[in-house]
Image (cartoon, rainbow, N blue to C red):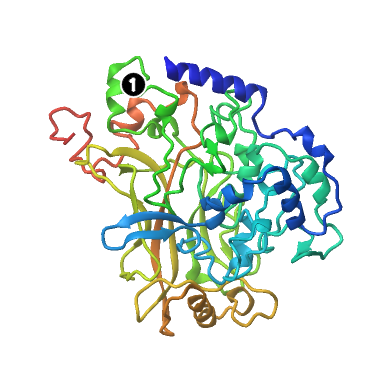
Amino acid sequence: MKKKIKILAVLCAGSMFYGAHAFANEDHKEITGPFNSPMEVTQKCLECHEDAAHDVMQTSHWTWTLEQTCSDEKGVVQRGKHNVMNNFCISIAGNWPRCTSCHVGYGWKDNSFDHNDTSRVDCLVCHDTTGAYKKPGAGAGMPAGYTGVKKFDKNPVDLVKVAQNAGAPGRDNCVVCHGFGGGGNNVKHGDIDSSMVKPTRDHDVHMGADGLNFSCQECHSTESHQIKGNAMAVSPKGKNHLNCTECHDAEPHQESLINNHAARVACQTCHIPEIAKEMPTKMSWDWSTAGDTVVDPPLDDYGMPTYNKKKGSFIWKKNLVPAYAWYNGTAGGSHLGDKIDPTTVTRLSFPKGDINDKTAKIYPFKVHTGKQIYDAKLNHLLTPKVYGEKNDPDAYWVNFDWNKAATAGAKASGIEYSGEYGFAPTEMYWRINHMVVPADQALDCLDCHGDSGRMDWKGLGYSGDPMMAGKGAKN
């Protein structure tokens, strides 16, 4: 009964206040300027919100790292975007100004950034309600028009206007970073993109304006700026999980056979049949082909580029059926400096669990494959410096010299580089939790079972379709 009451309360909150955009706090209209830097805005915010910067500084949104135990061999480690490699843009080491454009801080342009400077906390990126607050793609987290402490172009963000209209975060505050990470709209997740700002109920039953109209924080609940939920790719042993059962009963269906499935099948598996429903998502990124000059690079059937001289070759997919794997709530992943076998696929992140693990469920994932630079002598992945200002001799995107980029990147991340490089295959698993469809659009029995079912039963550890009685299928 308690869960039903909670759902009703959340529904009312969603319809009255939350949604794609939040509303400004009228008390902020009293804020006056001028502000010569965004840091001055933060100092103004802290006059009333005294603990806010301290609270933000305890979060992984600020530190880009999280203390966790990822393996018995390594014990407790600090792991996060700060020091984890991916198969998109590879690493922030040496590439800080580009990567930290989505940091909730100002000026993280190199490894000397002071994480203890409260004035460097960016209050506006999450609390802007005007839609006018922009952080350029290579601005080290500074808003448009500002660098250091001075204005530098003709069109700076109007900091007074944005500060006067600060309010609770809306969906667009979250999506601007989480939907566009990795270099573009829906590159990374597959289930978080610009379409999630104002989706229909059919697109996402929780967030659709004609549905429950939830804000992000209805599920990603927040206390002292600690936001519930961890990305498996960077925090495989993060314990701050979200569960459907926080609002829904563990056995919510009228049919007992379906409820029995819930013991070994995640809710998301049936209720998110497809992702990338409006915006294609990147499925493969091959860095080894970068550097060639291609006249009029070909576009795919979705109008997406299949090649970029700076980044290499891409494969995109739309209306994507997820991959399915056992997941027990924990995951594994590679660490900086780990040895690899370049002849096999290195899993940068992957779910843990199998058919014999009674705590594991079949869960949907996006699997992104890559081909990225590694040390051909020492056999570990490298962190190349790809971004650089004009005439930067080490930046790959300037001089297209992998050896120089690898040397500079290794120095920035603190790993060894032998001077010999190659390219090795990798893959990353991304959990699918968004784009939940209405119940009447969820998967039916034959979507998974039968001759045309989507499940790879043998890959999941069964001898065959478990619904096929007398066929020796293990359950």
320 vs 98, left or right, is: left
Residue for badge 1: 251
Near mark 1 (Cα within 10 A), the count class, few <14, some 14-19 or many ≥20, is: some
165 vs 442, left or right, is: right
Residue at 50% across, 47% down: 189
Q: Residue furthest bottom?
A: 419
Look at the image and tell me whether residue 319 can be seen.
yes
Residue 242, how many percent across, how many down? 44, 36
Q: Considering the numbered disc 1 on the image, is that residue within a helix, a strand or a loop? A: loop
Quick one: 325 or 172, which is closer to the camera? 172
Residue 301, how many percent across, how many down? 57, 49
Task: Identify whether 475 is placed above or below 387.
Answer: above
Residue at 65% across, 80% down: 392
Residue 163, how many percent across, how many down? 77, 45
Question: Which part of the image, by quadrant, shows the N terminus?
Answer: top left
Residue at 35% across, 52% down: 350
Quick one: 244 or 467, which is closer to the camera? 244
Q: Quadrant of residue 450?
A: top left
Give, as a three-letter code, the residue at label 1: Glu
Q: Quadrant of residue 341?
A: bottom left
Question: Which part of the image, by quadrant, shows the C terminus?
Answer: top left
167 vs 224, left or right, is: right
Look at the image and tell me whether residue 210 can be seen.
no
Task: Identify whether 298 is placed above or below 52.
Answer: below
